[in-house]
Amino acid sequence: MYSQSLVNTIEPIKLTTINRMNRGKKWEYGYNKEHDLIVLSRNGQIGEIIEIQNLIIALPKPPKKIYKNPKNKWVKLEKPKDLDIIKNIFDWRSYPENNKEKWYDYIDEEFKRREEGFWFMNNGKPTWITGTHYMYLQWSKIDVGAPDFREANRLFYIFWEACKADKRCYGMCYLKNRRSGFSFMSSAETVNLATISSDSRYGILSKTGADAKKMFTDKVVPISVNYPFFFKPIQDGMDRPKSELAYRVPASKFTRKKITANEKQEDLVGLDTTIDWKNTGDNSYDGEKLQLLVHDESGKWERPDNILNNWRVTKTCLRLGSRIVGKCMMGSTSNALDKGGGNFKKLYNASDVTKRNRNGQTKSGLYSLFIPMEWNYEGFIDEYGVPVFTTPDTDVFAPDGELIDVGVIDNWQNEADGLKDDQDALNEFYRQFPRTTEHAFRDETKNSIFNLVKIYEQIDYNEEMSRTLGITQGNFQWVNGVKDSQVIFYPDPKGRFKVSWVPKSELQNRVILKNGVRYPGNEHMGAFGCDSYDISGTVDGEGSKGALHGLTRFSMEDAPANSFFLEYLSRPPTAEIFFEDVLMALVFYGMPILAENNKPRLLYYLRRRGYRGFSMNRPDKVWNKLSVAEKEIGGIPNSSEDIKQAHAAAIEMYIQSHVGHLGDGNYGNIYFNRTLNDWAKFDITKRTKFDASISSGLAIMGCNRHLYTPSAIVEKQKINLNFAKYSNKGNMSQLIKKQND
């Protein structure tokens, strides 16, 4: 049964606290540090608190009186026909005075909705939309006329409003599906903000300059042109400009005084607010102060253009010192990773709201949002704007009156199943209509040396079953901090380890002491593989990660066979922390480790601590053929071409036998998608870039070390059996004597 996880209603604050603050109208719009949430209410009172992709947002409290259309759903409110003939404020001035009075309240109410949002009944449920969303639905003209109300867009605009309200945030990084409406929604927001701002600059970028220009001329300009007179400033230049839209007069909230003032057009002070577009490039808008930057199709910037470089430059256009004065609205589907998708993926991952610096900001400054395709797929949204996830039991109709008789999940799966034999076509389908972020960043298959069908089958299974796989994040620790004693594992959401299985207590910490050297007591159960690093710091602060993987083998113990049970991909502040992490994992599981010895500090660390017995020797050589260093610390080199080939073959063998669909409805039990994605991208000619692949491959080799043991070569020697020879001439055989006899 499908269960959505995009948005959840939560209760992080006691109801008594909310009620007390509501009575005093003490909730201020913006980020509330005390309760760690973002308040979107403008009247000091909050209602429902929701969580969208880990961002906690407090919505306004519903009013006593809520607008209800006779159809019990969103229907665009009819504009008074008497006002259709009025195109600007000067037409209004010439309007008969006795007819103006009745429209003052109407205009005031529209400005209020623009600022505070709008409540309406939708299928019997009180529903709030932001002011920006209201302007999009009520006053924006798109290619099909008036936009439909969609719940997915409501959540999008709520998230965007939270980005605007949060003083720590530079904007949003939106990972979307194809035809989700982002271009029109961001264009509508551009016009909405520009028409109430003075001395401001609004910019548009896309995957090419031509695309940015098209967005400007086909979306932004028509929306601006079709605004009602009370929202629309006087415009400079051409009616439908090609490169810049300039506003002269601010559309600040019309009061009776402003509406009845007798200013002449030539007396009006210039607004000096512009909307324009730029050609795509790393330095677009460099040095310019922006109120809003719209980044369309940012996941499709191909070389030499680089979205990461551009964002580093344009980010400074949105700040004055430490104060954020502008926002970025970024959205895109993803290209293949080597066609711009890889850089967008890095930017998206750097926008995770759960990972903040001491200033409360994400690494990019943006907040990431992903809305799965099932929320916004054309043809599977009912008349109330709600997605039809599963096949309905009763008649459900689309806004155009068409019957929806199948759920979007089933429809999507049927289409995906039809592409199973064409992996590149399937991956393109996933990127266009992703249900998970893994789908959105699917890569092309042409460069992969492994079976991507099986890898992606496993990834999809892991995503679908993520809540039941039992992955625990945490760290290992010596009991009471006493080294070389007992190790325990404790859960920690920020821990460096991910584990899917721990042995029973009697199998934990099985260490055998022989002649002062410690050996693993569970060597028969499995092994670890490790890709280490020797240097603590790096110039760019990145560097490759330390990688550790644990894999079981078949045994008579109570343990899953051929299962990756531990993944560690991290770079702690010092190499010594990493070494100690590895050591504690080895002790806890009582299993040996096969590590590359070209970065020997880890292996020397184990030897110095008395754990040389845990370090496996290279399995492809007998003891007397090992070098002095290999005898001293163990490990396996990464320079040998034979080792490289054997390592890749080990991963390939494991994938074929233990990954993806295994038949009878069963799937493999490697639940670590970071490792699976690393396998999917693995390039044997650039091995150093793939920490997880190196580490996991060594774990597989460690568990199957008997396959690499060299056969003993027996030197063949001539054997003289000294059989006696006889002459059979005559009646009796005669012994033939040797000449020397």
Image (cartoon, rainbow, N blue to C red):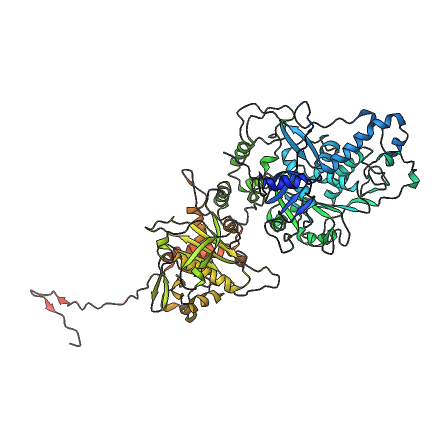
Q: Among all residues in the image, which is located at the extreme bottom? A: 740
Residue 280 pos. (x, y %): 72, 49
User: Who is closer to the viewer here, 649 or 494?
Assistant: 494
User: Who is closer to the viewer here, 461 or 189?
Assistant: 189
Residue 544 pos. (x, y %): 55, 59
Q: Examine the rendering and report whether any part of residue 84 can be seen.
A: no
Residue 177 pos. (x, y %): 62, 39
Q: Examine the rendering and report whether any part of residue 422 can be seen.
A: yes
Give the residue drawn at x 83%, y 38%.
233
Within the image, what quadrant is residue 313 found in? bottom right
Give the residue drawn at x 77%, y 51%.
289
Within the image, what quadrant is residue 217 found in? top right
Within the image, what quadrant is residue 406 found in? top right
User: Quadrant where the C terminus lies?
Assistant: bottom left
User: Who is closer to the viewer here, 410 or 21?
Assistant: 21
Q: Is residue 666 left or right of residue 219?
A: left
